[in-house]
Image: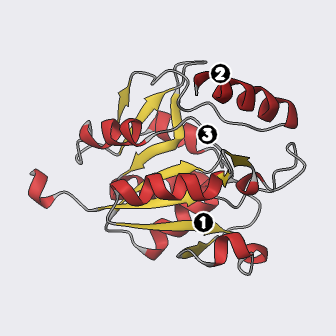
């Protein structure tokens, strides 16, 4: 497949999680006075042809999300795989650049490096986790060819996007350091705020 024939890249910002460990909506957490959902949205818009926010039914009217193009999860209570499958169902002919909304250190350079390393004949392009070396599914480029595998795994009761990537034919890039560190608890949020303040 030539570069000219490669599927276009759309962005999917995952924001449908229940945020139970954080005890509040992670999308609303602010760094530098800006909700991290909007910060992540700007990153996606800068590198993709079109972008969408993944939401649950209950979030459709949320003021933070309602002003952005949305894709509603068509699967209940299966985690990030719901958002990815729902996006693929909306458009199965594009590659989806999927990122979680709770990656406060993610930057445009890291996303462009991912895109530049892409080979559309692979099923996906992903970074290796700096914690275990396995593919990071929530900052990854999912090609159209991986849809059948992910759908089959979910229908079989396996809801892990990471395990789908492990089974697929992917291009695995070296870890980009701490750029993909996510925040799940109030304690981690406080630590991240301190870390960002030290860098600024």
Please indicate whether residue 55 sits to the left or right of residue 164 in the image: right
Q: Can residue 1 be seen in this view?
A: no
Q: Which residue is drawn at 74% across and 66% down?
A: 76
Q: Dot 2: few (<14), some (14–19), or many (≥20) neighbours within 10 Å?
A: few
* Label located before the other in sequence (2 or 1): 1
- Please tell me whether mark 2 sits on a helix, a strand or a loop: helix
* Front residue of this view, candidates 41 and 193: 193
The residue carrying pointer 3 sits among few (fewer than 14), some (14 to 19) or many (20 or more) residues within 10 Å by Cα, namely: many
The residue at the point 64 percent across, 70 percent down is: 73
Q: Disc number at residue 198? A: 2
Task: Tell me if residue 106 comes above or below residue 69 in the rendering.
Answer: above
Describe the element under mark 1 as helix, strand or loop.
Answer: strand
Residue 35 seen: yes
* Residue occupying the far right of the picture: 23
**Which numbered mark, 2 or 1, is in the foreground of this view?**
2
The residues bearing labels 2 and 3 have C-alpha atoms spaced at a distance of: 14 Å
Give the number of marks.
3
- Say few, some or many: other residues with alpha carbon within 10 Å of mark 1 (under 14 / 14 to 19 / 20 or more): many
> Gap between marks 2 and 1, in whole Å?
32 Å
The mark found on residue 104 in the picture is 3
**Relative image position of residue 117 (x, y in whole percent):** 26, 36
Above or below residue 5? Residue 164 is above
Q: For residue 68, which quarter of the picture?
A: bottom right
Residue at point 66%, 35% (across, down): 182
């Amino acid at each position: 497949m030539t570069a000219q024939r490669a599927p276009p890249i759309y962005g999917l910002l995952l924001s449908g999680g229940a945020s139970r460990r954080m005890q509040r909506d992670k999308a609303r957490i602010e760094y530098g006075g800006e909700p991290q959902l909007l910060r992540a949205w700007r990153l996606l818009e800068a590198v993709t042809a079109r972008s969408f926010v993944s939401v649950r039914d209950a979030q459709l009217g949320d003021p933070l999300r309602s002003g952005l193009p949305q894709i509603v999860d068509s699967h209940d209570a299966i985690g990030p795989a719901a958002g990815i499958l729902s996006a693929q169902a909306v458009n199965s002919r594009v590659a989806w650049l999927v990122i979680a909304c709770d990656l406060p250190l993610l930057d445009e350079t890291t996303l462009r490096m991912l895109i530049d390393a892409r080979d559309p004949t692979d099923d996906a392009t992903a970074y290796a986790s700096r914690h275990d070396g396995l593919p990071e599914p929530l900052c990854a480029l999912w090609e159209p060819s991986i849809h059948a595998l992910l759908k089959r795994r979910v229908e079989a009761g396996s809801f892990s996007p990471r395990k789908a990537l492990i089974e697929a034919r992917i291009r695995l890039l070296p870890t980009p350091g701490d750029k993909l560190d996510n925040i799940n608890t109030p304690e981690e949020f406080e630590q991240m705020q301190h870390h960002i303040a030290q860098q600024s």
